[in-house]
Image (tube, coloured by chain):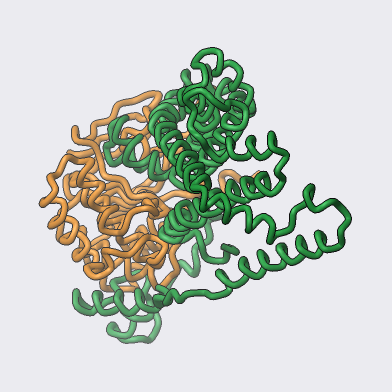
Chain colours: A green, B orange
Amino acid sequence: MPSNPPLVEEEPVVEPVEATAAETRHVHAALTRTSTGKEDLRELESGLDSLQSDADRKHRIDWTRILLPVAALVVLVLVWQFYVSLGVKRRDLVPGPLDVLGQLGVLWSDGKLQESVCTSLQRGVVGFLISVAIATPVGLLLAQVAPLRRAFGPLISGLQVLPSVAWVPAAIIWFGLTDATVYFVVFMGAIPSIINGLISGVDQIPPQYRRVGTVLGASRLQMALQIVLPAALPGYLGGLKQGWAFSWRSLMAAEIIAVGGTIGFGLGSLLDQGRTLSDMAVVMAAILLILAVGILIELLVFGPIEKRLLRSRGLLSGSTR
Amino acid sequence: MPVVLENLGKRFGDGAPVLDDVNANIKQGEFVALLGASGCGKSTLLNIIAGLEAPTSGALEVPSDGAAFMFQDAALFPWLTARENIELALKLRGAGKTERRTKAQELLELVHLGSAGDKRPHELSGGMRQRVSLARSLAQDRQLLLMDEPFAALDAITRDLLHDELERIWKETGRTIVFVTHNVREAVRLGQRVLLLSSRPGRVVQEWSVTEEHRTDAGLAGQLTGVITARLREEIRRHAK
């Protein structure tokens, strides 16, 4: 932001030169009226506006965005297949891509694949949404009320560092082998990271926005909802992304550790089943499925939202996205 | 009298006073240019009039409904379009939905941006942003409009045009305007009265009135600019070591 520059007045004294009155009016533009009327002013301004604003650019489908990741995937699978065909390890310890693909087909026809993906995804999404509903007001409150933040800030940051798997034993003792255990672990993973994302988003708001809000007469609640929350949206979205990642990871951890009881059959349970049966193809298939769900959520949900948000604020030009 | 400043003083903590014994009367509908070098507390004075800061001594009288404020950078909200930025000001003022729609369009047309209402701030040029910002401060519907070097960051061509524009809008809306600047030409171009503020501490040391003749006669305006610049430099020279 330009601060007051050192005072330099360009040519302050105007020599009364030999120009006529009509000419002087245009020569000394900065000192007197420069336009000759309302219509003239409108025309000048619209001319300047079109000179100074960029022409709209068309957005076309960029095929490299699709082709490059697909090519990278193909290369990785080829490298995997090559390694397996070298025969360094036994086939039942390191299955090849085709073995895993076959196993996925078997799981599909058993209905296990659909069941585990649906169960896990549903829990992950529900757990995440409830976390958002809890974390957003709490985060906004902490970010806006200084004493609260001083009191609880360190605790929330600490909770974010604490691996949520650590809660699994406690949750099993409290809630037994029920869905409550799974959700509890998901909440403990997601809520702190969403709160932290929102707080850091609020911290990065230019102070000018709040001053404008004050000048425009915003009340405390209006300031929080109409100015602070939208201004913090990019940081908040980062927090949501991380919160989703934490819910998904915590969910998998909980499903792997807590098996049986009324807990349904999720991807973590599938992974654990593969381990107990020493069936490496099932283990690999489960890992790939967990990864695929993560990638799909990023590609279909967070990616487009983030891109739209950044583009609408003019923050996308020059980035590598 | 919308604004009366009496022996106004301001200091931050135990530091030297920023403002000391500032006296000024600003009449209804008047356009006053507040001129001074860097560090004269122009912005502080404006913040005090706006009620964003409290003075440490003296008394001031301002309109009970407060003042509209326009900043040096447009300070538009990037997540809202030009129109929505103006509508937000109307909303925070308590205007209803239909009133917001019509009023926002009226204001956009007033600043000659009737067709750019759906653009985002980053799609607008600096001059257009400042015009949206002006429309937003008019949306506050306060009699008193405070402007803190609103055109300082613009290029010369745009600034000249915005001077014409502001003069026109001032005449159409009858606002009382206090315009802070460090540019003597700008002060003479816009103000009916130019108040010169000294630096460290800030105090009104002299004032000039600018007549309608100065608006059309460049020679006359140039002369006045020369006189004011000389006085301003005298103030600056006092601080030489």
Name the residue located 53 percent from the left edge and 61 percent from the top edge: A8
Residue B235, image x and y in percent? 50, 47
Q: Is residue A22 left or right of residue A255?
A: left
Location of residue B227 with respect to A276 vertically, above or below: below
Q: Nearer the viewer, residue B12 or A294?
A: A294
Q: In the figure, B36 relative to B122: above or below?
A: above
In this view, the residue farthest toward the top is A174
Measuring from the top left, give residue B15's x and y in whole percent: 55, 27
Seen at 51% across and 40% down, the residue is: A244
Looking at the picture, how far across and down is residue A304, in whole percent? 45, 58
Whether residue B192 is visible to the viewer of this picture, yes or no, is no
What number of labels is visible?
A: 0
- Identify the residue shown where x is 40% and y is 73%: A53
> Which sits in the foreground, B98 or A28?
B98
Q: Nearer the viewer, residue B143 or A208?
A: A208
Point out the image quarter for the C terminus of chain A. Answer: bottom right
Q: Is residue B98 visible?
A: yes
Judged left or right of residue B46, residue A251 is right
Q: Nearer the viewer, residue A166 or B170?
A: A166
Residue at the image position 49 percent from the left and 63 percent from the top: A9
Where in the figure is residue B9, as x and y percent of width and height?
A: 40, 29
Q: Quadrant of residue B171?
A: bottom left
Residue A39, picture quadrant: bottom left
Question: Looking at the picture, does residue A173 appear above or below residue B220?
Answer: above
* Vertical comparison of A300 with B17: above or below: below
Q: Residue furthest right?
A: A88
